[in-house]
Amino acid sequence: MPFHRRYASPLDLTTRQARDRNFAFYGQDSWKPTERLTAVVGLRLDWVRRFDNIFNVTRENSRIVQPRVGFSYLVTRDARNVLRGSYVRVGEQMMGRDAVTLFGAAGRAGFVDTYDLDGDGTFETRFDDPARTGSLAASEFDSNLHQPYLDELIVGYRKQLPYALGIDVAGIQRVYKDTYGRIDINGFYPAGPNQPFGGFGKVDPTRGIVYQQTNNSWSRLNYTALEITATKNLSHGFQFMAGINRQWQHISGNWNPTDPAMFIQPSAFPNNKLLYMPRGNNEDNSLPLTSGTTVHTYGPTWQKYRLNFGGSWIAPYGIVVASSYTIEAGPWSGAIVDTIDDPNDPRRTLFGPAIVVSSTGFRASNPLTTGMRFVYPTRGDGQVMAPPVKTLGLKIGKKLALGGSKQAELAANVFNLLNAGDFTQYNYNGANEVFNKANYLQMRNQQPARALQVTLVYRF
């Protein structure tokens, strides 16, 4: 029995037609103020303009200034102890997959959804979602929109030890600023938490949520890391390298001004686990109505630690043995959420009716009456880290001298020797949702199985 019908008009339309450009200038200089000190200073300037050819709307017209300075100081004259540091501001590249390219100012069909809620054959409930217009497209972009950027500070110390050993220790502080963000410019949101939603119609009474592309001035992503690298140069037929990375991250600031979580669970904002990827346009609704949103369960940027070990040995009789071993922390589950199923529960009804009606009679869902809730006091609490991903590789080869400069090498390479079967991601379809019995804390993307590769190299 049909219960939902959707109509679209027009069925054929142009959805993207943009003209973007980026002109950049970069200059750098280095000099030695003293015998032991080398200093570097540089500056990059970018002029970015993005224009929509469908509605003749300027998406972005901005400039970003990116200074960078650094130094290297020989603590001892023999260069066995080196102190270094750098500061750099790096702007987001202009690319075809970022938030501005994929957002708004594009041709979009109008949709009419009708529902037969009581099963009597009459589709009595109707929702209209009008097509996009040029006047609306002009308001979809903040006039001060500009490229996001990050500030990065690195301080490191390298020491050379006997037996061709070297160790390098570095601290890194990185802050992602002014990332892309979206705010709803059409809703009448309450002045504080636990108050009813005022409906839609602030800029257009015939629509529901109307997002405006802007820069996120309300929160920042903060990354701090300790990196240790140990190396041994080739001597006596042996060399190795080990790298250790331990990182800490957190989000500072506050909710997106029109994020439903701002009014439903304002104190749950802190998060020091999965922060998702920093490209933006992913935090305008932290309590989505539907399952399967990767915004909550996918974040390869924020692994807790990574250990890398590698070495090679040129053994007697032309035999070469090499190995690599990697241990990487498993991904975080994302903020754990559950749902309040009863639409008449006071925790939902205090935000007003589930359907709001504008002055023109336009009907839309109330974004604050969602039943989604964070389970723990904050988004960082209760997140589950998956088991670490361990990968061991091994190579055994034999070099054969064929006379003169000719040489052959026969080798066998084994990938993932332990065949650990670890997973690198949580399931996209609700792995952080307690009520999602099929996918809660389930994994996806298992590492490749053990594999053998035989190679023959001939050099002449």
Image (tube, rainbow, N blue to C red):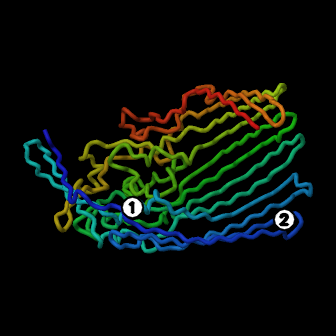
**Which mark is drawn over residue 437?**
none
Position of the C terminus by quadrant: top right
Return the x and y of residue 312 as percentages of the image width and height: 77, 34
Give the side of residue 221 with respect to residue 107, left or right: right
- Answer left or right for 214 relative to 422: left
Q: Is residue 225 left or right of residue 265?
A: right
In the displayed structure, 397 sits above or below 190; it is above
Query: Residue 132's x, y, as percent?
Result: 28, 65
Label 2 sits on what residue type?
Answer: Leu
Query: Looking at the image, which residue is at 68% across and 54% down?
Result: 172
In the image, residue 401 sits, relative to residue 89, either above or below, namely above
**Where does label 2 land, which residue?**
37
**Residue 405 sits in quarter:** top right
How many marks the image carries: the answer is 2
Q: Nearer the viewer, residue 335 or 455?
A: 455
In the displayed structure, would residue 374 be above or below residue 104? above
- In x, y percent, where is residue 194? 34, 57
* Residue at left offset 56%, top offset 38%: 330
Disc 1 to disc 2, C-alpha distance: 48 Å
Looking at the picture, tell me which residue is in the foreground, 103 or 365.
Answer: 103
**Most foreground residue, 46 or 12:** 12
Few, some or many residues within 10 Å of mark 1 (<14, 14–19, 20+) = some
Can you tell which mark lies on residue 103? 1
Q: Classify 136 as above or below 14.
A: below
